[in-house]
Image (tube, helix red, strand yellow):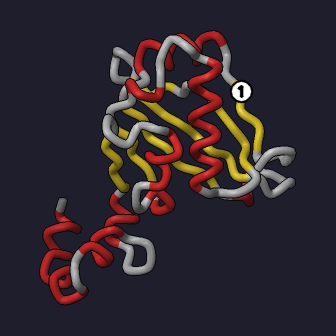
Amino acid sequence: MAGTVCGFVWMTGAMRLDWELNGGELFMDALGRSMNNKGWSSQTIAMYDCNKKICLPSESLIAEESVDAYAWNLQATAEMGPGRSLKDVRIIWGDGIFSGDSLLDKLGIRDTCKLCLDHHHLLSLDLGAWPKKFSLPTFSQLQDDLTTM
């Protein structure tokens, strides 16, 4: 999307250090557009630091919640913190827009990264991975166990 603004991303010195030291396992989500008067989603990448406390390697506002916006945010974060490559990322925990492999393909980390969906998106009949990967009758049999997990 050359020539268009897809969002704003920023990183402080402390965020850069956290990214470079702890960026192997990421949690990503976008928060509602209702949180600001311009209607932009706030997107976060979160990680655990060495003390198992949550830290953010960057913060961003995105024009739309899409695979392209998530990929752009991760690529911008990696460019601002060059001490860690996206190829070093082991796991990305994300929400329903990550279904399939398109984000991993866009980031070029397809062979080195696992992609996990959160509980809501695993079980959602509209968005979820499980109903799409299994037939609905099989999903119905597994749903109670998935909910327990």
Q: Is residue 131 above or below residue 63?
A: below
Q: Is residue 75 above or below residue 3?
A: above
Return the residue nearer the eye: 126 or 5: 5
Q: Quadrant of residue 118?
A: bottom left
Q: Is residue 105 above or below residue 20?
A: below
Q: Position of residue 72 (x, y in %)?
A: 64, 40
Q: Is residue 82 left or right of residue 117?
A: right
Residue type at mark 1: give it: Trp
Q: Is residue 54 above or below residue 71?
A: above
Q: Position of residue 119 (x, y in %)?
A: 33, 60
Residue in the picture at 53% in, 45% down: 106
Q: Position of residue 52 (x, y in %)?
A: 34, 23
**Label tally:** 1
Q: Secondary structure at mark 1?
A: strand
Residue in the picture at 73% in, 43% down: 61
Residue in the picture at 86% in, 45% down: 3
Q: Quadrant of residue 112?
A: top left
Q: Is residue 103 left or right of residue 90?
A: right
Q: Position of residue 138 (x, y in %)?
A: 15, 83
**How many residues crowd mark 1 within 10 Å: few (<14), some (14–19), many (20+)?**
some
Residue in the picture at 76% in, 53% down: 63
What residue is pinned by disc 1? 10
Return the residue nearer the eye: 105 or 71: 105
Q: Is residue 86 left or right of residue 74?
A: left
